[in-house]
């Protein structure tokens, strides 16, 4: 066929191919073919082309120019001119034709085309070149909205929800776009009846993106391990381990020199593996949860046909067909007539259904909105949606972007930062001790040379260079001992153990560091619905028979049945209550929440709603339902009662339905005229209910006359206004999402604990304030700045680009308690601003609750994010640190309690660990500087620092929380981890331990010359002390280095004189050979070295360990408490670990083979008694230490 252009705006009117095969048919026949739709013309104007081109006969050069032919030709030309003009009109009317079909079929426009089956195509966007191939987006791209503009439209409608906001920010928007479906259909060049053609999908996907939110690959385990190794403490431990290995294996060439370094590296490996594997498993679990989300199938209109496809295949411009039960997978704009009711609960957290359609205002409320967002749920109704944003351009996509930003800003936890700082200080202190020791040793060596002490008469390269190297080795050893190598493992174990116990309190901790961070929370930004409230609409007030009742069960008399019947009959049958599972509590609401509340009320009135529905079934003859509408604000149902009379039941807005009533049901169940006094009472009750933040409904009924269909008719049609006149008021019900019973006490606990609770909700400001007053978040003493709506908050604290004005923000947030009509980004702004603020003089720690997808950025941004386990979406859970399994605010308070307990448990361990380290450092320093070697061997320190400390971390981390933890203020973020009381305990206990150990090291042990028996030795000061069983526990040989015990000066006789060939007193002559009195290796032995095991040093090691063991009991208390045994019987694991450690210590000393490996000898019973008494002395002394003022010591205030 041929193709002609009939209009200047490129509307192509083609002759259909079939027309060439019908050369002899008359014009009328061809017109009939077109009218019957047999040619399936793709353009309205094609029918005109066919009718015109088929009219004249085929003209050739041979044809005679008869008058008839001339006349026919002239008529043909005139007809073509008319059709060309009409073609232009068709081009102009195509938009109106397409849009009219989205609401109703236009008979006038259909008449233009002559067929009901012709579809108007959007010629300015899609053209057919005759071969059936579609042309892509070409010359008109500049007329189409961009991806960013469409995303801005969706954000604009989501952020502005009040009437004023909609009128001034949405309808009068900066984009200068009329907020109508026709606008976006035109801008996106979409026919709502045809959808887009398949040929345009790729072009639209290229321009607007795919409906997929990219997911980053899971971080591999090795990368998590590498990240864990960046911990400053672990880095230092690795360095210390390498130094220890080099010195022990290559310098000293000690057979056991590898032990200390290997043990430290093992501890580092365990810490890294525990943390990394835990993080990897958690991430894998949550990815698996996200992967379980179905690749939903959706119904789409394309090429005029209904198609089923994956939601990921949707593109901007698609027409999606929605119906009840669907989950919306992208953002869009409703087109055409619909009765959609959308639940945005999983996006906003609010349970109220949102009616969809062009903007419609209901007084001071927005009754209808046109935009639909991805992630929401179609509760009821059917309709069509124009896809406006897909993938990362959707509102959910912007939330994902915010989450990524929060991930990029993610920092170490409060405790991790404090421990890093403390490790740095310990490192500096250890380095100082090490340097000091080396300097002392060098000075001591120089003084020895100056005074001519034993082995220091002259420089010997073979001896003294090695001695200098040993000084450096001693310094490095002290440096290594100073580091609490068990600390990272202890913290990890403590957190992991606490996490398991927290699960019993409905806290599923995803990130270990969140445990202790929650203990320092200063602000909790909490949702209202489901967290502070039950998330179930409930009737909490009833006016019936002239009285107000707070519980349905309190209603008595004949009115009960009438109230139950009137409430249940006038509900939709798709609203019902699902019974709880075995062992569960409470019904599950299905359908309209408000109607579910009425069904619950009926049950409480002792008239089960199922029986009422059985009495008045949905399919009963004569049943008529007049659905609720925002215009009428009421719903009416007509049924036939058992007496055969027609009864109309009506419910709706209290002030409207009550105004239609002229009677009310009295206490006796009889209908009584409404007097002025009763009228005043009804109005006052409505006002009182409103002041309480209740949604008030009036429930009414009317027995209709037998000829009601005639009596209530106007012009032959039933008049609803006639039916709804002269109603009888059965009662008023006040409905709300009630506050959880335990919430007020929990809020009071938080306030007592120094935590400010702020409610952030999408509810209107009056309802939010009423709930806040009930739970104690807001009091009458709070000023006007305590309650703000989201729009006012945004206008005050952010600039035009959405950036926080911190100075202005600091004036707002300290007094803010309720943020109503807020958006998720408002919550994000609130969290960010509080975290950055120093208005109160201290940095704030912010916890946030959330359940919707839109809460994810705030959950990520917060120091601790709480997601709801029941109502929360997978996205919210994935963004959170802790999941509240029962959606209860009380569980958040328990998380605070556990957070403080975990923090205190770690502090308990630190107090214990650092006391051990202080004692060990000083003993190592004194041993190296005075004795030339430490009394404690490397393997003994391994037992103390790694094995014993690890068990101690378990013992001290298993302390359960108590409510006294909520009686103190939270610790600030910049507070030092060590308090004054902790430092006092550490210093005093370490000091006492050092006194005991020094006395044991110096005052015990008889000095024996080589070859002497113990009875010939020089007695120690305590040798004559008798034990409980009669023996002399201190009558033992010295374990000190011989150089310390025997070598004082060369003239004393204790030290063999250095060889002098000219001095015969320095050598003996046997058979003419001079033999030096001082053996060649004597000086190496005199400066210390490996020695045999002795009971002396075994007692030193045993007392040292037992003092730490008993001090472990003292470490249970870090706030200067007197009774260190309080609650110890409740912690069976602590008792088990202490006893187990004691048994292990006994085995190290008494078990043959094991004691040799640990450099120990078996002890006598009296020696054990002495060791136990000295170890236990830490407990009574702790009572004396309490009396020492903590203010005398450095550290944070308690």
Image: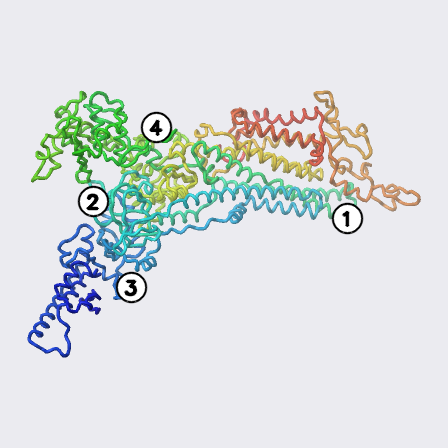
Q: Earlier in the sequence, mark 3 or mark 2?
A: 3
Q: Earlier in the sequence, mark 1 or mark 3?
A: 3
Tell me the CA gap for discs 4 and 2: 37 Å
Tell me the CA gap for discs 3 and 2: 42 Å
Can residue 844 be seen from the camera position used here?
no
Mark 1 = which residue?
Answer: 462
Q: Is residue 530 left or right of residue 1022?
A: left
Q: Residue 166: x, y in percent?
A: 24, 46
Q: Is residue 822 left or right of residue 60?
A: right
Mark 2 = which residue?
Answer: 360
Tell me the CA gap for discs 4 and 1: 83 Å
User: Quick one: quadrant of the N terminus?
Assistant: bottom left
Mark 1 closeness class: few <14, some 14–19, many ≥20 residues within 10 Å: few
Q: Give me the residue at 70% from left, 20% from top.
A: 1028
Mark 4 = which residue?
Answer: 741
Task: Check residue 133 in the rendering and tell me which mark sits there, or answer none.
Answer: 3
């Amino acid at each position: 066929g041929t193709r002609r252009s009939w209009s200047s705006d490129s509307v192509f009117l083609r002759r259909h191919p079939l027309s060439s095969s019908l050369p002899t048919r008359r014009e009328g026949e061809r017109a009939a073919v077109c009218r019957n739709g047999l040619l399936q013309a793709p353009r309205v104007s094609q029918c005109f082309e066919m009718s015109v081109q088929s009219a004249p006969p085929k003209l050739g050069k041979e044809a005679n120019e008869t008058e008839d032919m001339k006349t026919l030709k002239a008529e043909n030309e005139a007809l073509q001119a008319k059709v060309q003009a009409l073609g232009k009109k068709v081009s102009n009317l195509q938009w109106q034709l397409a849009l009219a079909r989205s609401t109703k079929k236009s008979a006038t426009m259909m008449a233009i085309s002559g067929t009901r089956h012709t579809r108007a195509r959007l010629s300015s966007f899609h053209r057919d070149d005759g071969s059936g191939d579609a042309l892509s987006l070409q010359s008109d791209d500049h007329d189409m909205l961009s991806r960013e503009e469409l995303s801005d439209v969706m954000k604009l409608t989501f952020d502005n929800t009040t009437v004023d906001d909609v009128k001034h920010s949405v309808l009068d928007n900066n984009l200068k776009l009329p907020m109508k479906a026709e606008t976006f259909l035109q801008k996106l060049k979409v026919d709502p009846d045809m959808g887009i053609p398949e040929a345009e999908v790729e072009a639209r996907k290229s321009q607007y993106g795919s409906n997929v939110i990219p997911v980053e690959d899971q971080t591999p385990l090795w990368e998590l391990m590498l990240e864990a190794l960046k911990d400053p403490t672990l880095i230092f431990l690795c360095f210390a381990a390498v130094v220890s290995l080099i010195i022990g294996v290559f310098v000293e060439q000690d057979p056991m020199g590898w032990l200390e370094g290997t043990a430290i590296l093992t501890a580092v490996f365990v810490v890294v593996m525990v943390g990394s594997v835990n993080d990897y498993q958690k991430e894998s679990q949550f990815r698996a949860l996200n992967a379980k989300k179905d690749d939903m199938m959706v119904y789409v209109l394309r090429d005029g046909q209904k198609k089923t496809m994956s939601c990921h295949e949707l593109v901007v411009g698609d027409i999606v067909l929605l119906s009840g039960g669907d989950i919306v997978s992208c953002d869009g704009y409703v087109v055409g007539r619909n009765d959609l009711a959308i639940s945005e609960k999983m996006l906003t957290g609010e349970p109220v259904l949102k009616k969809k359609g062009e903007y419609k205002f209901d007084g001071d409320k927005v009754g209808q909105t046109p935009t639909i967002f991805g992630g929401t749920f179609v509760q009821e109704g059917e309709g069509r949606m124009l896809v406006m944003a897909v993938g990362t351009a959707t509102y959910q996509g912007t939330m994902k972007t915010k989450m990524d930003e929060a991930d990029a800003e993610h920092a170490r936890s409060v405790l991790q930062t404090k421990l890093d700082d403390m490790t740095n200080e310990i490192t500096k202190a250890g380095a100082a001790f090490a340097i000091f020791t080396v300097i002392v040793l060098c000075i001591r060596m120089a003084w020895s040379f100056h005074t001519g002490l034993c082995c220091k008469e002259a420089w010997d390269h073979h001896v003294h260079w090695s001695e200098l190297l040993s000084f450096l080795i001693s310094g490095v050893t002290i440096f290594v001992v100073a580091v609490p190598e068990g600390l990272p493992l202890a913290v990890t174990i403590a957190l992991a153990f606490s996490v398991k116990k927290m699960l019993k309190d409905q806290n599923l901790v995803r990130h270990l560091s969140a445990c202790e961070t929650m203990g320092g929370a200063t602000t909790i930004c909490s949702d209202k619905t489901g967290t502070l409230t039950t998330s179930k609409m409930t009737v909490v007030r009833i006016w019936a028979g002239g009285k107000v009742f707070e519980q349905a069960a309190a209603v008595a008399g004949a009115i009960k049945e009438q109230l139950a019947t009137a409430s249940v009959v006038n509900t939709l049958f798709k609203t019902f209550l699902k019974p709880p599972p075995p062992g569960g509590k409470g019904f599950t609401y299905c359908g309209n929440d408000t109607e579910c509340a009425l069904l619950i009320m009926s049950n409480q009135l002792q008239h089960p709603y199922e029986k009422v529905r059985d009495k008045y079934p949905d399919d009963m003859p004569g049943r008529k339902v007049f659905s609720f509408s925002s215009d009428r604000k009421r719903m009416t149902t007509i049924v036939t009662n058992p007496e055969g009379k027609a009864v109309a039941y009506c419910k709706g807005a209290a002030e409207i339905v009550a105004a239609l009533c002229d009677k009310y049901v009295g206490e006796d169940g009889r209908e009584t005229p409404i007097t002025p006094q009763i009228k005043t009472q009804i109005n006052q009750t409505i006002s009182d209910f409103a002041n309480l933040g209740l949604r008030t409904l009036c429930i009414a009924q009317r027995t209709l006359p037998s000829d009601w269909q005639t009596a209530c008719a106007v012009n032959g049609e039933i008049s609803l206004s006639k039916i709804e006149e002269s109603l009888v008021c059965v009662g008023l019900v006040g409905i709300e999402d009630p506050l959880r019973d335990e919430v007020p006490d929990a809020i009071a606990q938080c306030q007592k604990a120094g935590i400010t609770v702020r409610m952030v909700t999408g509810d209107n400001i009056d309802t939010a304030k009423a709930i806040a007053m009930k739970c104690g978040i807001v009091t009458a003493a709070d000023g006007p700045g305590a309650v703000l709506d989201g729009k006012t908050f945004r206008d005050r604290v952010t600039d035009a680009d959405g950036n926080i004005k911190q100075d202005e923000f600091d004036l707002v947030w300290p007094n803010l308690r309720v943020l109503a009509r807020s958006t998720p980004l408002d919550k994000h702004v609130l969290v960010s601003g509080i975290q950055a603020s120093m208005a109160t003089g201290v940095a704030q720690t912010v916890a946030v609750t959330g359940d919707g997808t839109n809460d994810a950025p705030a959950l990520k941004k917060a120091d601790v994010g709480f997601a709801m386990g029941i109502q929360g979406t997978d996205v919210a859970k994935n963004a959170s640190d802790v999941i509240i399994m029962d959606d209860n605010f009380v569980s958040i308070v328990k998380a605070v309690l556990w957070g403080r307990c975990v923090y205190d448990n770690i502090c308990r361990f630190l107090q214990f660990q650092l006391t051990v380290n202080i004692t060990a450092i000083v003993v190592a320093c004194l041993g190296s500087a005075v004795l030339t070697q430490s009394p404690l061997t490397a393997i003994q320190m391994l037992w103390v620092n790694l094995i014993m400390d690890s068990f101690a971390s378990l013992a001290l981390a298993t302390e359960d929380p108590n409510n006294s933890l909520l009686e103190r203020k939270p610790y600030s973020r910049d507070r030092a981890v060590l308090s004054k009381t902790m430092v006092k305990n550490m210093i005093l206990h370490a000091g006492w331990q050092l006194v005991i150990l020094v006395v044991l090291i110096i005052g015990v042990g008889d000095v024996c010359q080589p070859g002497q028996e113990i009875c010939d030795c020089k007695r120690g000061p305590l040798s004559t002390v008798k034990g409980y069983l009669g023996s002399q526990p201190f009558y033992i040989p010295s374990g000190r280095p011989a150089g310390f015990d025997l070598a004082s000066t060369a003239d004393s006789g204790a030290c063999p004189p250095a060889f002098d060939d000219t001095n015969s007193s320095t050598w003996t002559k046997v058979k003419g050979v001079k033999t030096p009195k001082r053996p060649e290796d004597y000086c190496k032995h005199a400066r210390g070295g490996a020695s045999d095991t002795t009971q002396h040093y075994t007692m030193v090691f045993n007392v040292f360990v037992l003092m730490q063991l008993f001090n472990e009991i003292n470490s249970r208390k870090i706030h200067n408490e007197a009774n260190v045994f309080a609650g110890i019987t409740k912690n069976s694991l602590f008792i088990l670990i202490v006893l187990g450690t004691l048994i292990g210590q006994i085995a190290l000393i008494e078990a043959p083979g094991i004691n040799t490996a640990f450099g120990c000898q078996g002890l006598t019973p009296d020696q054990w008694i002495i060791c136990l008494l000295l170890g236990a002395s830490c407990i009574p002394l702790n009572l004396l230490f309490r009396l020492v003022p903590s203010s005398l010591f450095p550290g944070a205030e308690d």
